[in-house]
Image (cartoon, rainbow, N blue to C red):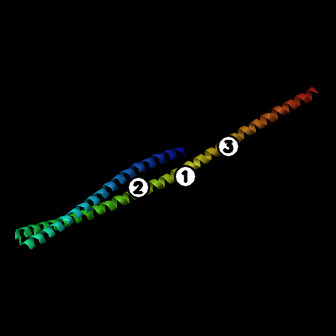
Amino acid sequence: MRQRLEVLRRLVGLYGVVEEMHSAELQRMTAAVRETEHAIVVEQDLAKSARIDGRGALAMGDRVGWMISEVQQKTAGRRLQRLELARQERKQSNDTAKQQYMATRLKREQVKGVLDEIAGRIEIEDGWRIQSDSDDRFLARCRWTDAKEKMRVDREMKAS
């Protein structure tokens, strides 16, 4: 039983390491999603700025400025599409990493539960064994005391 307990301890440790690895991967994926979302916001701001510049150029009759603004808006739109695809892919990877982390965490908790149960049983059995040994010593001492007393009484009876 103690060998099984030691194997389970090692297994819990191994699952703990794997859980930490999956946690780090989840954090990395979450950071990648946030980074992409931040890039999308920046790109949206650039597109908005290009629209505002285009309106200003159009109001001033600056055809070249307006055309540059249109190109910037189209470029920002294409970058936004690519960033959105990247965000969706990273989000999916993040979800996968989250599922792996949760599965590993659950598995570690299950093995730890079994470990705790076996450790509890061993502790109870050790308590029973200690109590049994104590009871045996007590009974042996009582028998020895009784035998010694009986020998003393027998000697006194023979002497009288």
Mark 3 and 1 residues: CB-CB less than 8 Å, in contact?
A: no
What residue would you read off at disc 2? 104
Per the model, the C-alpha gap separating discs 1 and 2 is: 20 Å
Horizontal and vertical percent position of residue 95: 33, 62
Q: Residue furthest top?
A: 159
- Residue pointed to by mark 1: 117
81 left or right, relative to 98: left
Query: Is residue 72 positioned above or below 109 on the image?
Result: below
Q: Residue at x 34, y 58 (%)?
A: 97
Q: Which residue lies at the image location 78% right of the left edge and 37% below the top edge?
A: 142
| Residue at the spot of label 3 | 131
**Marks 1 and 2, the one that precedes in the sequence:** 2
Q: Looking at the image, which is closer to me, 148 or 42?
A: 42
Q: Disc 3 versus disc 2: distance between alpha carbons?
A: 40 Å
Task: Give the answer, above or below, for where 1 lies relative to 147.
Answer: below
The residue type indicated by label 1 comes to: Glu
Q: Earlier in the sequence, mark 3 or mark 2?
A: 2
